[in-house]
Amino acid sequence: MQCRIRDLRCKEVINICDGCRLGFVGDVEVRVPEGQVVAIVVFGPCPFLGLFGRREEYYIPWECIQRIGDDIILIDKPFQRRSPDAERKRRRKF
């Protein structure tokens, strides 16, 4: 199955370990020289109608993805959570 990155943004991510709906793919991390997808990032829920930003992001390594369907992505392993503030601080260091 071939899939473009823009097509991934329309897919909902579901953890099959606990049946939790995580949200929709918001970003993709790609290793540029190889063109390899390293992980997908799912933005967490907005705290108050989306006015005050997002609380956390779900960083899901590519190895955790079990299956990609027409409208959902199933993952089957625990994944790392990170806050958007931590990501901004990490990017500033470089």
Image (tube, rainbow, N blue to C red):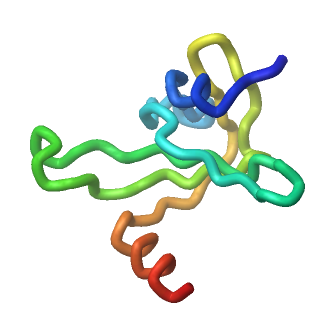
Q: Residue at position x 69%, y 38% from top? A: 76
Residue farthest bottom in this picture: 93
Image point (68%, 16%), residue name: 69
5 or 49: nearer the viewer: 5
Q: Is residue 45 left or right of residue 19?
A: left
Residue at image position (45%, 70%) is 87
Where residue 55 sits: x, y (%)?
A: 28, 57
Outermost residue, right side = 34
**Could you say which is closer to the camera, residue 69 or residue 92?**
92
Q: Is residue 53 left or right of residue 51?
A: right
Q: Quadrant of residue 66?
A: top right
Residue 80 at what x, y percent from top left? 56, 60
Q: Between 89 and 44, which is closer to the camera in this rendering? A: 89
- Which quadrant: the C terminus? bottom right
Residue at x-position 78% and y-position 57%: 32
In the rendered image, residue 6, in percent from the top left (x then y), is placed at 58, 28
Residue 17 or 52: which is nearer the viewer?
Answer: 52
Q: Position of residue 81 (x, y in %)?
A: 49, 60
Residue 87 placement, left or right of 61: left
- In the image, 10: left or right of 74? left
Is 86 above or below relative to 30?
Answer: below
Image quadrant where one finds the N terminus: top right
Instruction: Count every numbered label the image shows and give the total.
Output: 0
Taking the view exactly as shown, the residue that stands out farthest to the front is 33
